[in-house]
Structure formats: C-alpha cells, structure tokens
Image (spheres, grey):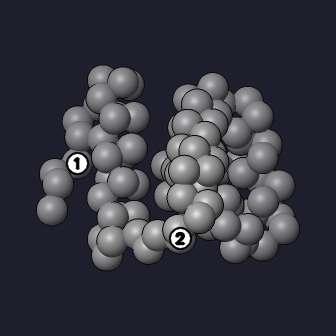
C-alpha cells in the first residue's frame, strides 16, 4: 500500500498517464480511501481543467521550476493541515 507521501510525489506522473499499470492501480486504491489525497487529487485535476479551458486558444509553457515549487507548496500545506513540521523552502 502506498503512503500519502508516495501518492503526492507521484500524482503528476499519474495525471500524465506516465506510470506502470500496477502503480496506477495502487494510486487509485489509495486515492479512493484517503480523503486527504483525494482532495489534493481533485483540486489538482480541477486546476488543470480550468487552466486548459482558459488557455485552449493559446497554449502556455509552464515556467522552469514551477512544477517543483507547486509540489513543495502542496506538501507544506498537507503537513500544516496535519500539524507537522513543514520542510524548508529552497
């Protein structure tokens, strides 16, 4: 069974359909029972849909490092909600 950290670390690959079938099954299973990870997944999915809808006519390129910063912010927020110590931003 995947941990929340493993799911959050792999969520971009999952959404990009860039992972092995057995890992996809584990991700779906975890997201199905973990409300915290499901909320993160749903939020990210909706953000992507809204972004694509707004930019259908003009494709945009994500700035270098934006993905890594976004993942870090999501990790910090998840830790904050659970009362943990957030990692240091680089």
Measured from the top left, where is residue 62 in percent x and y?
41, 69
Whether residue 11 is visible, yes or no, is no
Q: Quadrant of the C terminus?
A: bottom left
Quarter where residue 79 is shown: top left
Quarter where residue 45 is shown: top right
Q: Is residue 75 above or below residue 21?
A: above
CA distance separating discs 2 and 1 = 33 Å
Please name whichever residue, 1 or 19, is drawn nearer the observer in this view of the structure: 19
Secondary structure beneath disc 2? loop
Please name whichever residue, 85 or 11, is drawn nearer the observer in this view of the structure: 11
Whether residue 86 is visible, yes or no, is yes
* Residue that badge 2 annotates: 59
- The residue drawn where x is 36% and y is 54% is 70
Measured from the top left, where is residue 87 in percent x and y?
22, 48
* Residue that badge 1 annotates: 87
Sequence-first tag of 2 and 1: 2
- The residue drawn where x is 33% and y is 71% is 63
Quarter where residue 66 is shown: bottom left
- The residue drawn where x is 62% and y is 50% is 53
Measured from the top left, where is residue 89 in percent x and y?
17, 54
């Amino acid at each position: 069974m995947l941990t929340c950290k493993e799911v959050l670390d792999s969520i971009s690959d999952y959404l990009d359909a860039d992972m092995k079938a057995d890992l996809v099954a584990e991700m779906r299973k975890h997201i199905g029972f973990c409300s915290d990870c499901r909320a993160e997944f749903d939020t990210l999915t909706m953000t992507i849909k809204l972004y694509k809808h707004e930019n259908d006519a003009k494709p945009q390129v994500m700035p270098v490092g934006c993905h890594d910063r976004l993942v870090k912010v999501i990790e910090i927020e998840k830790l904050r909600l659970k009362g943990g110590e957030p990692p240091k931003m680089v």
